[in-house]
C-alpha cells in the first residue's frame, strides 16, 4: 500500500481545462440523479485484484442504496500520481479518486480537485466527524481542503520475536542507538537487523522527513521555500543512509527495494525489524502469524516519542477527492459520504488494517488490538504532517531520488559522508528552484 514512485517536473504549471467534462456522463439522470460514477482507488491490499475483491461488495452496497453504479479501477502506486496529473491537465478523469494525503496541497494547487467548503462538508455529514490530525493533511492552511481523509496510517517498528529471543534481546529498542546495537546482534547467518525500501521515493521521503525533524531540521522554511541542505535535514538523511553505509544492519540489496520486498524479508525471517505502516494484514497474507511479531513506537534519538524533536511518525494516510469538473458532483458527494460513514469506515479499515479517519468509528473494538493501539498513539501524540506546500510532490520526487542514489552509493561500498549527502541534497534543491 501507499508505495509511490511517481516523478513529476512542474506540477504547479498544470491548469485544469475549463469547460472539459471529467468523470462519467450522467446518462438520463443529470447531476441530481446520476446513474454511474467512476472511482480510482489506490492499491491498499496485497495486489490490485485483492483490492477489487475487498471493495466490490461495498460498491454493490452503495449501488443498492442509491441506484448509482460505481465503475472501479484500482491504480497501482507507481502510476497513480502521473495518472492523476494527466487527468488534471486533460480534464478527463474519474469522478472520485484516492490520493496520497501528502499530495493534497500539490494537487490542490492544480485547481483540478473540488474544494471541500462548508456546503460540501455538510453534504457528507460534517467536518467535525473527521480526526483533526488527519484533516491537517488535506491541503494548504487557510484554504478549503482538497480532499477528505479515508484511511489513516502511521509508522510502527515491527520486530520478529523469535529472532529477538535467539539474539538475547529483551525487547524492542526505544532509541536509534539501541536499534543499531540490536541490529548488529541480529545481523548474522545471512540475516540482517533492519529491512528498508531504499529505491522507494515515498518511503525515503517519509523517513528522511521524520529523521530531519528529530535533528531539529526541515526541508522547507515557513514561507514554503526549500531548505534541503539545512544541517538538520542533512543529518537526518545521513542517519537513514547509514543503516547500510556505516551501521551495516541492513542488507546492501535493500538499496534496490521498491516493491514491498522489505515486507517479504521481514515476514520470512530474513530481517529482524521493519519500519512500516499497518503491516499486520500484509504480514498475515505472507504467512506470518500474529504471535510471531510485535510492534512498538518508532525509536527517537533520546527520551520518549512526542512532539518537536521527538516526533517518530508522520500523519500518513489516503484521502478521497472529487474532480472539480465532474458532471456527477451530487452523486460523487453521496459516494464520499458513504465511504466515510461510520459503517464503511469500520468495514474498510478493518479489511486493510488501517485506522478509521472519523472519530466515532475509531472506538470500535476491532481497532483496539496492540498494533492499532501503537499506531493510534503515534498519530495522536508524536506524528508530524509532511509539508502542505504546492511543491511537496516535487520534494518527494527530487529528494526521494537523492536518497535512492545515496543508498546505491552505500550499497556499492562508496563512502557516504556529510559532504556527499549535502551535495546530493543541494542538487535536488537546484532542480526544484531551477
Image (tube, helix red, strand yellow):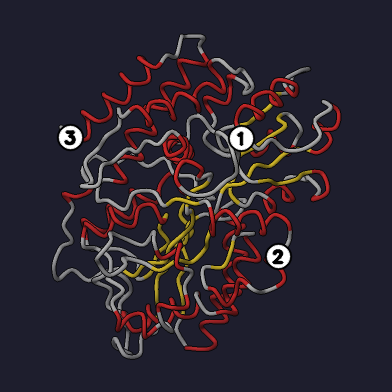
Q: Position of residue 17 (x, y in %)?
A: 15, 63
Q: Residue at x 39, y 52 (%)?
A: 102
Q: Determine the image quadrant of residue 292.
A: top right
Q: Residue at x 39, y 17 (%)?
A: 418
Q: Residues within 10 Å of mark 3 (few under 14, many from 20)?
A: few
Q: Position of residue 213 (x, y in %)?
A: 42, 39
The foreground one among 289 and 7 is 289
**For marks 3 and 2 on the same chain, the one whose residue lies earlier in the sequence:** 2
Work out whether 234 lies above or below 360: above
**For marks 1 and 3 on the same chain, the one whose residue lies earlier in the sequence:** 1
Q: Residue at x 21, y 28 (%)?
A: 430
Q: Which residue is mark 3?
A: 433
As drawn, which residue projects farthest toward the front?
303
User: The residue tagged with tag 2: helix, strand or loop?
Assistant: loop
The foreground one among 244 and 55 is 244
Q: Residues within 10 Å of mark 2 (few under 14, many from 20)?
A: few
Query: Is 343 left or right of 7, judged from the image as shown?
Result: right
Q: Which residue is mark 1?
A: 261
Compute the Cα span from label 1 to label 3: 34 Å
Q: Which residue is mark 2?
A: 368
The foreground one among 405 and 222 is 222
Amino acid at each position: 500500500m501507499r508505495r509511490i514512485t511517481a516523478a513529476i517536473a512542474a506540477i504547479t504549471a498544470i491548469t485544469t481545462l475549463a469547460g472539459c467534462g471529467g468523470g462519467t456522463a450522467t446518462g438520463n439522470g443529470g447531476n441530481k440523479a446520476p446513474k454511474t460514477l467512476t472511482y480510482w482507488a489506490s492499491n491498499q491490499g496485497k495486489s490490485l485484484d485483492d483490492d477489487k475483491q475487498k471493495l466490490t461488495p461495498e460498491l454493490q452496497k452503495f449501488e443498492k442504496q442509491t441506484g448509482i453504479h460505481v465503475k472501479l479501477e484500482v491504480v497501482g502506486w507507481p502510476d497513480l500520481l502521473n495518472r492523476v496529473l494527466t487527468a488534471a491537465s486533460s480534464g478527463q478523469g474519474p469522478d472520485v479518486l484516492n490520493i496520497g494525503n501528502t499530495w493534497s496541497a500539490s494537487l490542490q494547487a492544480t485547481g483540478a480537485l473540488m474544494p471541500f467548503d462548508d456546503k460540501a462538508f455538510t453534504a457528507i455529514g460534517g467536518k467535525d466527524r473527521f480526526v483533526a490530525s488527519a484533516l491537517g493533511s488535506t491541503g494548504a492552511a487557510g484554504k478549503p481542503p482538497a480532499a477528505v481523509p479515508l484511511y489513516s496510517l502511521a509508522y510502527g517498528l515491527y520486530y520478529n520475536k523469535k529472532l529477538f529471543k535467539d539474539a538475547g534481546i529483551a525487547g524492542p529498542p526505544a532509541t536509534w542507538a539501541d536499534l543499531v546495537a540490536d541490529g548488529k546482534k541480529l545481523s548474522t547467518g545471512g540475516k540482517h537487523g533492519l529491512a528498508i525500501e531504499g529505491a522507494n521515493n515515498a518511503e525515503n521521503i517519509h523517513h528522511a522527513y521524520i529523521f530531519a525533524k528529530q535533528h531539529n531540521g526541515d526541508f522547507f522554511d515557513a514561507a514554503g521555500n526549500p531548505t534541503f541542505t539545512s544541517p538538520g535535514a542533512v543529518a537526518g538523511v545521513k542517519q537513514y543512509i547509514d543503516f547500510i553505509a556505516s551501521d551495516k544492519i541492513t542488507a546492501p540489496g535493500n538499496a534496490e527495494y521498491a516493491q514491498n520486498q522489505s515486507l517479504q524479508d521481514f515476514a520470512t525471517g530474513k530481517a529482524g525489524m521493519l519500519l512500516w505502516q499497518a503491516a499486520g494484514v500484509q504480514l498475515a497474507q505472507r504467512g506470518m502469524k500474529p504471535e510471531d511479531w510485535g510492534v512498538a513506537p518508532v525509536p527517537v534519538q533520546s527520551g520518549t516519542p512526542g512532539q518537536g524533536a521527538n516526533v517518530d511518525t508522520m500523519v500518513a494516510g489516503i484521502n478521497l477527492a472529487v474532480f472539480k469538473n465532474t458532471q456527477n458532483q451530487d452523486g460523487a458527494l453521496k459516494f464520499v459520504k458513504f465511504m466515510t460513514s461510520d459503517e464503511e469506515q469500520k468495514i474498510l479499515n478493518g479489511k486493510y488494517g488501517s485506522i478509521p479517519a472519523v472519530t466515532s468509528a475509531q472506538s470500535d473494538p476491532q481497532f483496539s488490538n496492540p498494533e492499532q493501539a501503537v499506531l493510534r498513539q503515534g498519530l495522536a501524540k508524536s506524528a508530524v504532517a509532511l509539508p502542505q506546500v504546492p511543491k511537496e510532490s516535487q520534494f518527494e520526487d527530487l529528494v526521494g531520488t537523492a536518497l535512492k542514489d545515496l543508498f546505491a552509493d552505500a550499497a556499492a561500498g562508496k563512502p557516504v559522508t556529510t559532504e556527499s549527502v549535502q551535495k546530493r541534497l543541494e542538487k535536488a534543491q537546484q532542480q526544484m528552484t531551477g
